[in-house]
Amino acid sequence: MEFVEKHGIRLARELNRVFSKAVELDEHQELRFDRLMDDIVMVDIHQHPMIMPDDISALSSYLRNGEYGWCYEAVKHGGWTAVATANVFRGLINTPELSFASYSDVSGEVSVMLTDMSRHTDVVNVSNSSQILAAKQSGKVAFFPHFGAPGNRETY
């Protein structure tokens, strides 16, 4: 798989980035696993599915560009039906400390993600369990945007 660049910043690969080892199964176990995966609905309720720069020292520059890559392929490869996206990274570039981020920054990141999702026919925005099940039945990856851990102030 080739590297992708956004605004001159080389992005990390979604797949085959780190060593992976499959658990060896016999034929019976493999059939059972396949049956389970056909029926199971796996939802990750807190994930940061943004593709990061290959060189993490370029993260601030990458975030300031305002156009990001999202890990649709990695989510699908991992067998996930849906991920609840814990959006926060864009908010970290404009805060004096990392304990909170402004609502407008984080909602801006969600907007960028939703715009990017609209360009992909194999990804769908969901907000409830029925939509997650429909995504699975149609072979699509479901993304459920949220703002991580909501606080009690205008910023969190």
Image: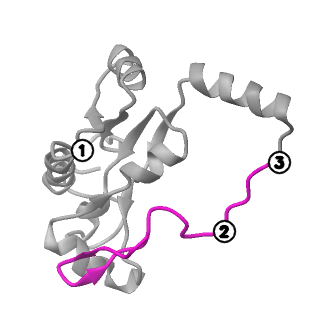
Secondary structure category for the residue under label 3? loop
Q: Is residue 143 above or below residue 13?
A: above
Q: Which span is picked out in magenta?
A: 1-23
Q: Earlier in the sequence, mark 2 or mark 3?
A: 2
Q: Looking at the rendering, which quadrant does residue 102 occupy?
A: bottom left
Which residue is denoted by mark 3 in the rendering? 24
Q: Position of residue 104 (x, y in %)?
A: 13, 52
Q: Which mark is residue 19?
A: 2
Q: Is residue 137 left or right of residue 131?
A: right
Q: Position of residue 61 (x, y in %)?
A: 23, 81
Which residue is denoted by mark 1 in the rendering? 153
Q: Is residue 26 above or below residue 23?
A: above
Tell me the CA gap for discs 2 and 1.
42 Å
Callout count: 3
At 79% from the left and 49% from the top, the residue drawn is 23
Tell which of 63 and 41 is nearer to you: 41
Q: Please identify the residue farthest to the top as the structure is shown.
A: 130
Residue 12 magenta-highlighted? yes
Secondary structure category for the residue under label 2? loop
Q: Position of residue 15 (x, y in %)?
A: 50, 62
In the picture, which quadrant includes the N terminus?
bottom left
